[in-house]
Amino acid sequence: MSFLKGTKIHSRPHIDVLGASFFFGAILFLMLGLNIIAETFSIFAFLIAGAFLLFSLFFFYLFIRQEQKDSNPILDMALLKSKPFLPQTYTI
């Protein structure tokens, strides 16, 4: 006996694949850049690491833009605007 007849969900949840890809790119290039800085010490290595860090910032920027536009984001931007994440002002 079923009390909830006809309550099937006919839509699948939307996964933000583009946002996940941008986040993956940002983390990947950040880790590559930091790894190159930690392992080698030359001007060429610093230039390559700087390029990787710039790519990381660019992918992070694309990730933030995508998350603000998407209806079902991976990271809800409203959470970052809530009280625990806002800078605290201390008065003495």
Image: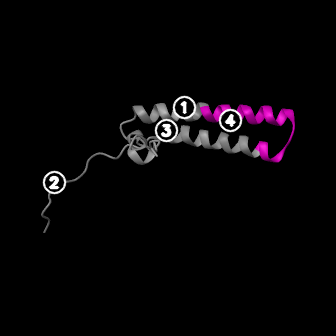
Q: Which residues are magenta?
A: 36-57
Task: Give the dominant element type of the magenta stretch: helix, strand or loop.
Answer: helix
Q: Nearer the viewer, mark 2 or mark 3?
A: 3
Residue beneath label 4, please?
Answer: 53
In this image, 27 relative to 91: left or right? right
Q: Quadrant of the N terminus?
A: bottom left
Of the numbered discs in the image, which one, if any, rests on residue 61?
Answer: 1
Q: Residues within 10 Å of mark 2 (few under 14, many from 20)?
A: few
Residue beneath label 3, please?
Answer: 19
| Marks 4 and 1, how far apart at CA | 12 Å
* Residue 25 picture quarter: top right
Three-letter code for the amino acid on which mark 4 is drawn: Leu
The residue tagged with tag 3: helix, strand or loop?
Answer: helix
Q: Nearer the viewer, mark 4 or mark 3?
A: 4
Residue 37 location (% of width, % of height)? 78, 42
Residue 44 location (% of width, % of height)? 84, 33
| Marks 2 and 3, how far apart at CA | 34 Å
